[in-house]
Image: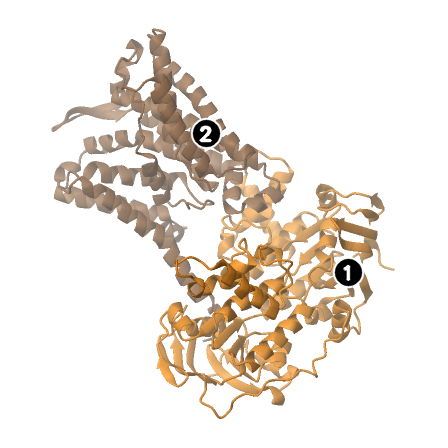
Chain colours: A orange, B brown
């Protein structure tokens, strides 16, 4: 019988009239990897914050070892060995690796003066704990996401963590980096350190979990040994319904007509080489490849953000020059970036303002003023069409969940009537239920006449939306798959195979 | 190690300093003399002090322009106060009283920033205007040349002197020692105290600094206190170096000091900055201001030159970032090829 470290019993938490957690219990054993899964708003983050001592539960008890807490403070939580690694890793980008690692100990001991020798010693010890080597004097902002995550983990270990809570830890990692993170989690396990792994990505959950816990609408709906648990079952528990992938209908592609977009021998040094393909009317064309395969560069080239060095681009049979974003927009090309928070939205602004931002010139009346009614009508139409879940279009975008924010980005581009829409990772960080809805939306957009270039490494996503899929490797298109003729297995093998050196 | 030095901002600005000196010297050989060095250093002294005082605030992510007004109000008020009481003594009491006032004025900014969560720049814009207005309205509006007898010799207190064929006896003023002491103190404060590291932490990521347990309010109050005290020292020193008290001293200079700090490699958004870089930045701006005349370049051009160097300098990291971003996407690709 494993030793239990943490037990949360019958915990409820309400915010105003909303019940975030409703009579939920959770326990974590020593050395266990427990995966906590659930859609946005299911209560995962509330649970993390209760365990971290940031929220006090309205009802329920927390037991850590044999200590009983009605109310846990953040300091008590840390003293009990609970460490949360947030998505931003809580690091100082301008400071060195060594200082980032050692700063907590420095503060915890209440030292007024800094001994740099000791800081380096602490940092070196920390790095040795997980057997990795990073230059101590490197500035953290120059490191990769994976390395920053390692530093966050080291910080947790140096704080004598017994339970490390990782909040969506793989969001920004490449597949290789995910693999080494999982190895590290296994390594922690052998040392008796437990991990509470919070994630959307069910295929990763099946890989790493000893036990899987699923929350839905503030309730625990599943808590069982992860062995034999498959993705479909988890999806069912998460969403409360079966997501039927077999019943998907795809629109007809106009095979005969002239292609809407044609690219010939496009080339960008350090980006991609000799890219040629056609995008037909009503088609969803997938472009996949690992990070660094040149897929994002290609999208940015077509959108004019990183104009290609040479090659030809045709829209509707006519050759066009895309030297900047205005050219792309002029030719009816829209781009929805993968980092919607940073590049796609004005978070503080209202949903309405965000939707109409790219079409304000159409909403100007005779006095050259903004037609407020036209604005509200236009954005109202898109909120309805894309089913953005909000009580009012006047609320700031940051009040929306990830899936709904993504819809607002889409609405913004659709409002400008693009012919071609480039979507880069349209469901990154979006939960399963909204994901299926966004996929349906992509398919129906294509049916309605917008051709879509979908850039993604989420294979089920590609299969759920695309007519054809191009695989990029080392900056080149190396293979083309038709949806009907390929499978998830084949695609994932080919995709991972792409991590090797480019074939000559 | 050597590589790191060569790549550093400080080294680049050092090269510019040397290059500019060479050009000026070639055009006008009179430039190459110790008296020129002493002259530039003397004109730099108060700017060094103010820049060192401002540096921690900039590193913490704030932009302050009120320090010049604090220098003016503290030095001028101290002088008028002592003058009215018939003070006959030396310079020390001036520093003591002015520093006390500077401390309070700095803390006023600090309290407004920490207690009411106002942006540093907004607060400083208000206190900048307020202190100059206060001085002119309540203390006096004219320059005052009546120095107490005990302070008269201070103007010519040189560490050592030499005979220059052109300008006669000249020397290095002893207040350069204050600069060295203050520079060392700020360097030590920023590098070797937890509070100083907190200044960098706040500038790097304020949210994380709070979460890590830094006492943000205390740190901000201390940086403002340092700024207030050093501004007062700069104000008094300037008055005795120029032998008169000016109620609107430095009113047009806050941006020169900020420019020096930025040239020295500090990020205007916070998180980065060094004492050495700041000192070099001050020297570069003073060199440009004092010596372009020697080359025959009209005075009006000086501002243009400073501006151009600033543009080049501030855009350097941006260009580097842009390239890194473009290359960054495809690191795996480059390895694969």
Residue A315 picture quarter: bottom left
Q: Position of residue A430 (x, y in %)?
A: 63, 66
Q: Which of A328 and A352 is in front in this view?
A: A352
Residue that protrudes farthest toward the front in the picture? A366
Identify the residue position indicated by label 2 in the image: B226
Q: Which of B186 and B59 is in front in this view?
A: B59
Q: Where is residue A325 in the image (x, y as percent from the top left)?
A: 40, 68
**Image position of B291 (left or right of A7):** left
Q: SS class of the residue under badge 2?
A: helix
Q: Distance between the residues labelled 1 and 2?
A: 51 Å
**Image position of A149 (left or right of A140):** right
Mark 1 chain: A
Q: Where is residue A433 in the image (x, y as percent from the top left)?
A: 69, 69
B183 up-or-down from A87: above or below: above
Q: Quick check: do tags 1 and 2 share a chain? A: no
Residue that protrudes farthest toward the right in the picture? A1
Camera-nearest label, 1 or 2? 2
Residue that protrudes farthest toward the bottom in the picture? A256
B284 up-or-down from A279: above or below: above
Does residue B102 appear in the picture of this structure? yes
Mark 2 chain: B
Identify the residue position indicated by label 1 in the image: A32
Q: Which residue is drawn at 35% across and 76% down?
A: A321
**Image position of B93 (left or right of B285):** right
Q: Nearer the viewer, residue A230 or A19?
A: A19
């Amino acid at each position: 019988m494993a030793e239990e470290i943490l037990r949360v019993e019958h915990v409820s938490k309400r915010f105003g009239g909303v019940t975030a957690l409703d009579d939920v219990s959770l326990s974590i054993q020593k050395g266990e990897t427990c995966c906590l899964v659930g859609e946005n708003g299911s209560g995962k983050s509330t649970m993390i914050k209760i365990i971290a001592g940031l929220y006090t539960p309205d009802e329920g008890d927390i037991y850590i070892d044999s200590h009983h807490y009605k109310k846990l403070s953040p300091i008590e939580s840390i003293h009990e060995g609970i460490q949360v690694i947030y998505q931003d890793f809580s690091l100082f980008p301008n400071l060195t690796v060594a200082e980032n690692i050692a700063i907590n100990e420095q503060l915890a001991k209440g030292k007024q003066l800094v001994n740099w020798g000791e800081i380096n010693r602490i940092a070196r010890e920390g790095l040795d704990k997980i057997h990795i080597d990073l230059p101590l004097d490197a500035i953290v902002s120059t490191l990769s996401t994976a390395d920053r995550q390692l530093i966050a983990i080291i910080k947790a270990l140096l704080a004598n963590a017994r339970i490390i809570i990782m909040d969506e830890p793989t969001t920004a990692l490449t597949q290789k980096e995910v693999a080494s993170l999982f190895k590290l989690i296994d390594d922690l396990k052998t040392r008796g350190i437990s991990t509470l792994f919070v994630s959307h990505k069910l295929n990763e959950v099946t890989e790493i979990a000893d036990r899987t816990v699923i929350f839905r609408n503030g309730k625990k709906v599943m808590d069982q040994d992860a062995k034999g648990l498959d993705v479909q079952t988890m999806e069912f528990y998460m969403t409360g319904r079966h997501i039927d992938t077999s019943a998907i209908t795809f629109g007809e592609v106009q095979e005969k007509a002239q292609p809407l977009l044609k690219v010939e021998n496009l080339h960008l040094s350090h980006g991609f080489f000799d890219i040629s393909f056609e995008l037909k009317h009503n088609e969803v064309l997938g472009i996949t490849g690992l990070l660094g395969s040149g897929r994002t560069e290609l999208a940015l080239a077509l959108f004019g953000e990183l104009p290609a060095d040479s090659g030809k681009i045709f829209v509707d049979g006519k050759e066009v020059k895309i030297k900047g974003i205005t050219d792309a927009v002029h030719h009816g090309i829209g781009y929805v970036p993968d980092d919607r928070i940073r590049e796609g939205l004005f978070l503080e602004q209202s949903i309405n303002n965000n939707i109409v931002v790219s079409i304000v010139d159409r909403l100007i009346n005779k006095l050259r003023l903004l037609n407020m009614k036209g604005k509200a009508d236009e954005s109202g139409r898109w909120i309805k069409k894309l089913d953005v879940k909000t009580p009012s279009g006047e609320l700031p975008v940051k009040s929306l969940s990830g899936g709904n924010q993504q819809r607002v980005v889409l609405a913004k581009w659709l409002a400008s009537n693009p012919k071609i829409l480039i979507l880069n990772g349209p469901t990154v960080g979006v939960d399963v239920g909204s994901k299926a809805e966004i996929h349906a939306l992509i398919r129906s957009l294509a049916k309605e006449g917008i051709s879509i270039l979908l850039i993604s490494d989420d294979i089920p996503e590609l299969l759920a939306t695309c007519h054809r899929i191009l695989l990029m490797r080392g900056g080149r298109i190396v293979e083309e798959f038709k949806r009907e003729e390929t499978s998830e297995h084949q695609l994932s093998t080919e995709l991972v195979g792409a991590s090797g050196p480019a074939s000559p | 190690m050597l590589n790191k030095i060569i790549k550093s901002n400080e080294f680049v600005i050092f090269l510019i300093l040397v290059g500019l000196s060479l050009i000026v010297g070639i055009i006008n050989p009179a430039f190459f003399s110790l008296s020129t060095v002493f002259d530039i250093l003397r004109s730099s002294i108060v700017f060094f002090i103010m820049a060192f005082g401002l540096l921690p605030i900039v590193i913490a992510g704030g932009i302050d322009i009120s320090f010049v007004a604090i220098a003016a109000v503290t030095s001028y008020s101290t002088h008028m106060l002592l003058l009215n009481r018939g003070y006959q003594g030396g310079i020390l009491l001036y520093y003591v009283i002015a520093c006390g006032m500077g401390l309070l004025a700095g803390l006023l900014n600090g309290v407004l920033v920490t207690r009411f969560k106002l942006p540093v720049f907004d607060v400083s814009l208000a206190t900048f205007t307020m202190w100059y207005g206060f001085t002119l309205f309540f203390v006096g509006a004219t320059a005052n040349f009546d120095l107490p007898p005990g302070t008269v010799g201070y103007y010519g207190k040189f560490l050592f002197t030499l005979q220059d064929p052109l300008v006669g006896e000249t020397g290095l003023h002893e207040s350069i020692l204050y600069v060295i002491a203050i520079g060392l103190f700020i360097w030590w404060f920023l590098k070797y105290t937890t509070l100083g590291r907190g200044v960098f932490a706040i500038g790097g990521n304020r949210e994380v600094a709070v979460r890590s347990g830094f006492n943000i309010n205390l740190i901000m109050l201390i940086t403002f206190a340092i700024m207030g005290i050093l501004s007062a020292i700069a104000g008094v020193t300037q008055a005795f170096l120029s032998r008169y008290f000016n109620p609107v001293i430095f009113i047009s200079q806050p941006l020169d000091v900020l420019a020096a700090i930025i040239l020295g490699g500090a990020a205007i958004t916070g998180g980065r900055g060094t004492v050495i870089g700041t000192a070099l930045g001050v020297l570069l701006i003073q060199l440009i201001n004092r010596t372009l005349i020697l080359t025959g370049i009209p005075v009006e051009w000086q501002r243009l030159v400073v501006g151009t160097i600033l543009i080049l300098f501030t855009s350097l990291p941006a260009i580097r970032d842009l390239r890194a971003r473009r290359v960054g996407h495809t690191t795996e690709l480059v390895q694969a090829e």
